[in-house]
Image (spheres, rainbow, N blue to C red):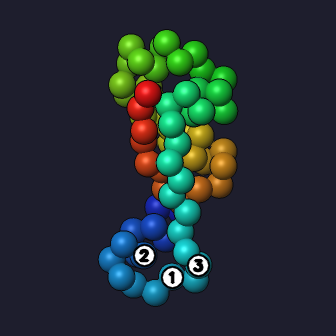
Amino acid sequence: MSASLFLRAMQGKDVPRTPVAPKIWLDLAARLTGRAPEALIADPKLAAVTVFDAARLCGADAARLFLF
């Protein structure tokens, strides 16, 4: 993930390309990372980490967390 690219774009600075920040629902993140959705519901921190991991796997510059 290129958080610096995303932050520069949000600050209105010039960036070499448009940053990608897809909606990643928790169930999709669980599927992409191989984690059990039930574990993510019980542990909000693990849920956030899982969404960030899924964003990295997809090559996104940032992640937006969407729950069930």
Q: Is mark 1 on a helix, strand or loop?
A: loop
Q: Residue at x 55, y 75 (%)?
A: 18
- Please, which residue is most extreme toward the left here? 11
Marks 2 & 1, CB-CB < 8 Å contact: yes
Q: Is residue 10 left or right of residue 40?
A: left
Marks 3 & 1, CB-CB < 8 Å contact: yes
Q: Which of 48 and 68 is in front in this view?
A: 68
User: Which quadrant: the C terminus?
Assistant: top left
Q: What residue type is labelled 1?
A: Val
**Residue 11 image offset from top left, x and y in percent:** 33, 77
Q: For mark 3, what is the residue?
A: 17
| Residues at marks 2 and 1, CA–CA distance in whole angstroms | 6 Å
Q: What element carries label 3?
A: loop
Q: Which amino acid does label 2 sit on?
A: Ala
Q: For mark 1, what is the residue?
A: 15
Which numbered disc, 2 or 3, marks the residue that appears first in the sequence? 2
**Residue 31 image offset from top left, x and y in percent:** 65, 27
